[in-house]
Amino acid sequence: MKISEKRKLLYIVSVVLVTIYLIWRIFFTIPWQTNIFVLIFALLLVGNEIISNATAFLLLILRISSTGKLQAKTSIPKFMPHQIVPEVDVIIVTHNEELALLQKTINAATFLKYPDKSKVHVVIADDGNRPAVRELAEAYGVQYIGMTNNTEAKSGNINHALKRLHSPLFVIFDADMIPFSTFLEHSVPFFTKNIDDLANDEDQVKPLGFLQTPQSFYHVDIFQHNLFSGKSISNEQDFFSRDINVLNGANDGAIFTGSNAIFLRQAVDEAGGFPTDTLTEDFELGAKINIAGYASISTILPESAGTTPLDVKGVIKQRVRWGRGVMQSTRNLHIFTNPNISFMNRVILINSYLYWWSFARRLVYIAAPVLYALFKVQVVNANFWLLLVLWAPGYFLLHYALSISPNHIRTEFWGEVQETFFAPYLFIPIILETLGIKAKKFKVTIKNAEASIIDRIYVLPHLILWIITLFAIVKFNYGKWGSEIMMGSIITFWLLLHFVNLTFSIFVALNRTNYRNSERFARKTTGKIYIDNGETARAIEIDDLSESGILFHFASSKNGMAVDQDFSGILYYENQPIEISGSIIRILIENKVTLYGATMSASPETANRHLQLIYDGTNKLLPSEQDGWITPFDTLQINLQIRGGQWRQKINLWRQQVRRLLHLS
C-alpha cells in the first residue's frame, strides 16, 4: 500500500484546486439577497460541500501520512522462542441466533491454532440461558456462561462473562462470525511483540489495547446480490474494514467494529468495561481504550467470516442502529471538547461522526439541481464559465484521486450509489438522535431473514426521487439548443448523475430472491471417490464445495461417472479424512476439464472437519477488489437486460392468465 511520489503529487494538486474552489464558493457565490428559505438551503449546500471535501482531504492525508507506518503496523509478527504465550479467552457472544449458525462458530473455535492450546479457553456467553446452547457447549467441550434478565444487551452479556474470566487477552466473536484457524497465530503476536517493545523502552511505543481484524463475509451483500454484481464489486463493508480502519490503525486509532477483535484485558478494565448506555458499545469502547492511552490497530487480511443480512429491511435497521449509536457515543465521549482525546484520535472520531451525516448531505445534493431545474431556485450565484473553470478541474481530479486507492476496493461512484440508497432511511434517525430523541431498544440484526413482497415498500423513496429527477431533466432541457444546453450543462450533469444513482438504488431496493440454501466456497483439496460398491477408488481434486454439495474433477481424464450415480469417498482437511457419500446431479465441461456436481453429506464422525474445511478461510468465489473492467454502465446494462427480461416474462404470464380467464368466461 505504498504511495508513489506521482500519486502524492496528484493528491496535493487535487486538494489545492478544490480548496481554491471552496474559498470562491464561500465568499462569492452565496445568494445573500434572496429570501430566507433559499438562503438557508444555500448555506446548507455550501456547508455540506465543505464537510464532504474535508472528509475527502482527510482520507488523502491519511493515505500519505500512513505510507511509512502501514507495513510496520500490519505485518504479522512471529512468536519468539523466549516468550511464554499468554492465556486467551475466546468469547462467542450469542443472543437468540439459530443453533446451526452458532455451531459453526463454536466448531471453528475448537480448531484455532496456538503454540499451547491448553491456554485457549473457548467460552459461550449466552444471555438467553438456553438449555440447547448449554448442551451444544458440552458437546464441543467448551465453557458455557449463561445469564437471565439481561437488560444491557450485548455489553451486559460480555461484562457478565468477563467477571468469570481471567486471561490477560480475550477475543470477541459474534455468533455468526466464524474464525479462521489462524486467528490467534495472526493476532496474539502483535501483543507479545508490543510487550517486548515496551520492556525494551523503545521510544514512542504505546501499549496495545486491542487489535481489530476486518469484518468479512462469506456471501454477497445486498448490493452485490441485487445488482447481479457478485463477481465484479467487493462487499460494501470492505471499504471501511480493509481500508479506512487500517489507516486509522496506522495512527493508533482503529475503531472496534463489534466482533473479530482481540483485547488486552487490562485495557478494557481501565476503560470501564463494555459501555451499556449506547447502541454501539463497540465504537465507544474502542474510543475509551484509546483515551486511556492505549493504541489500537486494524489488520488488512480477514481472519474470520460471517453473514450479512440479504433483506433490505434488515440492512436498513442495522444501519439505523449503527448511526444512532455513533451519535450517542460521540455525545457520551464529548469528541469535540474532551481534553483527554489526542489530536489524531479526535480527527478519526470526528471523521466517523461526519460519515453518518453524509446521507443527509446526499439528499441536499439531489435537491439542489432539482430546485433550479423545476422552480428556478438559484442557490449558487455564479457565472457559468467561472463556475466551470473553478469547480470542474478540482472535482474530477479529486474523484480520480479517491478512486485510485492502492487496494482498489471501491470506486467513488459506488460509494455515491451506496450513500444514495441509504440516504432516505438514515437522515431522519440521525437528526433525531442528534436532538436527543433516542431509540434505546436494542435488537439483534436477523441475518437470515427472507425478503417479502411487503419489503418492496422500501423502494418508494427512491422511486419518488427518481421520477422527480427524470421530470427535472426533461423540463430543464426541453426546447433548448446549442449554447443553452451548454450553459445548463452543469445542472444537467448533476441531474443525470443523481438519476443513475437513484436507478441503482431502485434496483437494490427491489430485492432478488435468494435460492441458494448453502454458500459455495472455492476450496482446493484432494480426495478419493469409491464406486462399484467400494471396489474402485479414483483420485479427485475439489474445485468448490458447500455444506450439501461438491464440485470436483478426476485427477485422471480417463475416469468418468454418470448423472444419478451414487458414490462414497474421502476428502482431506489438513491431512485428516472426511468421510462422505453423495450422488452426481450434473456434469459440465470447463476449459476441457469435466466437472462433476454432486449432492453430498459427511459422516457424523467427521462432520466437524467437513464444516472446518468449508469455513476455514475467505470465500475466494467472491471478489476482494473492484473489477476495473466492469464499469457502472456495464452493470446498469446488465441489470436493465436481466430485469427487463424478467418483467417481460411476468407481463406475458399475466396476459396468458387474462386470456385464459376471458376464454373460460
Image (cartoon, rainbow, N blue to C red):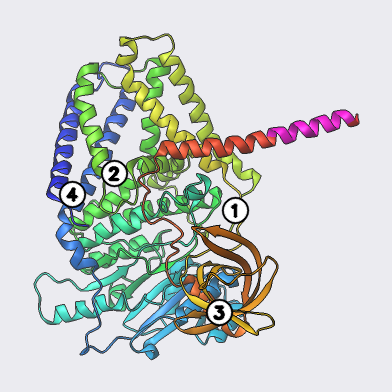
Identify the mark nearer the N-term, 4 or 1: 4
Residue 508 image point, x, y percent? 51, 43
Instruction: Give the side of residue 502 with respect to residue 194, left or right.
Output: right
User: Circle 4 — which element?
Assistant: helix
Mark 3 vs mark 1, CA separation in Å: 32 Å
Q: What residue type is labelled 3?
A: Lys
Q: Which residue is the site of mark 3?
A: 528
Q: What residue type is labelled 4?
A: Ile
Residue 266 image point, x, y percent? 28, 78
User: Circle 1 — which element?
Assistant: loop
Q: Would you place residue 11 above or below residue 159 in this image?
A: above
Contact check, label 4 and label 2, Cβ < 8 Å? no
Instruction: Give the side of residue 103 with respect to residue 352, left or right.
Output: right
Q: In which quarter of the image is residue 172?
A: bottom left
Q: Nearer the viewer, mark 4 or mark 1?
A: 1
Contact check, label 3 and label 4, Cβ < 8 Å? no
- Which dot marks residue 514? 1
Q: Which residue is the site of mark 4?
A: 61
The residue under the point 25% across, 33% down is: 396
Q: Which residue is the site of mark 2?
A: 403
User: Circle 2 — which element?
Assistant: helix
Magenta-highlighted residues: 651-663
Q: Which of 208 and 279 is in front in this view?
A: 208
Contact check, label 3 and label 1, Cβ < 8 Å? no
Identify the mark nearer the N-term, 2 or 1: 2
Q: Nearer the viewer, mark 3 or mark 1?
A: 3
Mark 4 vs mark 1, CA separation in Å: 41 Å
Q: What residue type is labelled 1?
A: Asn
Q: Which amino acid does label 2 sit on?
A: Ser
